[in-house]
Amino acid sequence: MASISFRNVTKRYGDVVAVDDVTLDIRDNAFFCLFGPPLSGKSTILKLILGLEQPDAGEILIDGRPVTHVSPAQRNVAMVFQNLALFPHMTALENVRFPLVERRMEPEHIRARVADVTEKLHIGHILHKPPAQLSGGERQRVAIARALVRDPVAYLMDDPISALDARLREETRVELRRIQREMGKTLVYVTHDQEEAMSVADGMAVFENGRVRQTGTPEDLYRRPNSTYVAGMLGAPAMNVLPMELAVRMQVADAPDRAANLGVRPENLRVGLGELAEITEVEPLGGFTTLGLSLEGTDLRATLRGQPKFTAGQKVGLTVDPGRAHFFDAGGAAIAAH
Ligand SMILES: Nc1ncnc2c1ncn2[C@@H]1O[C@H](COP(=O)(O)OP(=O)(O)OP(=O)(O)O)[C@@H](O)[C@H]1O
C-alpha cells in the first residue's frame, strides 16, 4: 500500500520540458488517472514513479519517503505492460509465476500467491493456455496477474486498453475497477480518453504541456472546472463556451463583471420556443438527442433527453439551467458567479 506525492517536480529532455513543476498527491489505494492529450507528460510521470527517470528538480515521495536515491527494484512499484509483453512460449500460469520463480521464492509461497491473484482476476480456467490462445481481454488479465503476483506497493498502467474495441474497452474498465478495489492497491492509470477517466477514477489530474491544470475527483472537475481548458477536456459533447456579448441574449443571471465568456454544458442548455437560434443539426442517439445550433454564427450543442420533435432549420429560444452557468475571464480562468 502506498501514497505517491510529487513536489514541484520538473523533468527535461534537452529543450523539451516533459514535466513542468508538477505537485501531485495520489492517496493510498486510489484509482488515480493521469489524463491529457498526447505528449502532455503522462508517461514521463510513470517513468519518474518507477525510477526509470530522475527528476531535474523537485522531489518524489512514496509513502511519505523521498525516493530520489531508491533504485527501481527497491521502490517495488509494478508497471503493467500491455499484453504483448507476455512470454509467448510459456503458458498463462508460467507467465504469472515467472516473477516469483525468478526471485527464487519458496514453491509453497509461490503456489499460495498465484492462487490468490488468479482467483481475484478470475483466470483460473485459462492458466494452462499459451498467450496465443487467449483473447485480448484475457491476455490483459494475465499481464495484470503477473504484475500483481509480486505484491507491489502500487501498480502503473499506460493506456492499457486503448487498442481494444469500444465494447471490450467498456467491459475491461469495469473489470479493472473491480480488480483495483479487490487488490486494495494504489493504481496510477494513464489515459487520453475522458470517458474512461471519468468512469474509473476516484481521483484524476488533467495535464497540458507537462503541467497539471487541475486535480480532483472526476465529479469535481466536471462540475467545477478551473479553466476553459479543463472544461473542454471533460464531457462529450464538450462544454459550449461563448462570449458574454452573445450570452446576455440568453438572459443568463448572476454574471460577474469580469466575465469574458460563458460556459454551458450541452445538457444544461434549454431549448424552447423562440427566435434566438437556429437548429443546424438533429442527431438522435436513442436515449438522448444532440442538437447542433447556431446563435448568430456561433455553433452550440445541446443534449436533450429522448427524441424531441425538432427539425433542422427551425428557430428556437435558448436559456441556461439556473445555477449551471460557468463564467471565465479573458485568460480562460474560471470565476465564481455572483
Ligand atoms: N526519452 C525521451 N527523450 C526525449 N524526449 C522525450 C522522451 N520521453 C518523452 N519525451 C518528450 O516529453 C514530452 C512528454 O512526453 P510523454 O510521453 O510523457 O507524454 P504523454 O502525455 O505520455 O504522451 P502520449 O499520450 O502520446 O503517450 C513529449 O514532448 C515527448 O516528446
Image (tube, grey):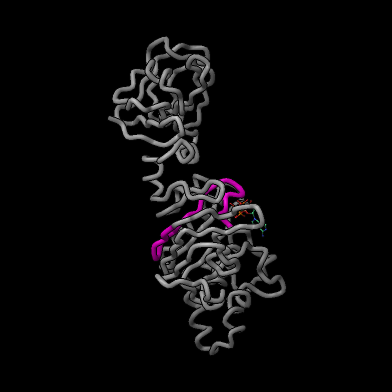
Q: Residue furthest top?
A: 275
| Residue 38 is a magenta residue | yes
Picture residue at 57% right of the left edge, 82% below the top: 100
In the picture, the quarter occupied by the N terminus is bottom left
Q: Is residue 148 above or below residue 166?
A: below
In the picture, the quarter occupied by the C terminus is top left
Please tell me how many numbered marks the rendered image carries: 0
- Image check: 137 left or right of 279? right
The magenta stretch spans which residues? 24-43
| Residue 228 is a magenta residue | no
Picture quarter with ligand 1: bottom right
The quarter holding residue 138 reads bottom right
Horizontal and vertical percent position of residue 131? 67, 67
The quarter holding residue 10 reads bottom right
The quarter holding residue 42 reads bottom right
Report the front residue among 203 and 260.
Answer: 260
Horizontal and vertical percent position of residue 156? 53, 63
Report the front residue among 174 and 8.
Answer: 8
Picture residue at 44% right of the left edge, 65% below the top: 4
Horizontal and vertical percent position of residue 177? 45, 58
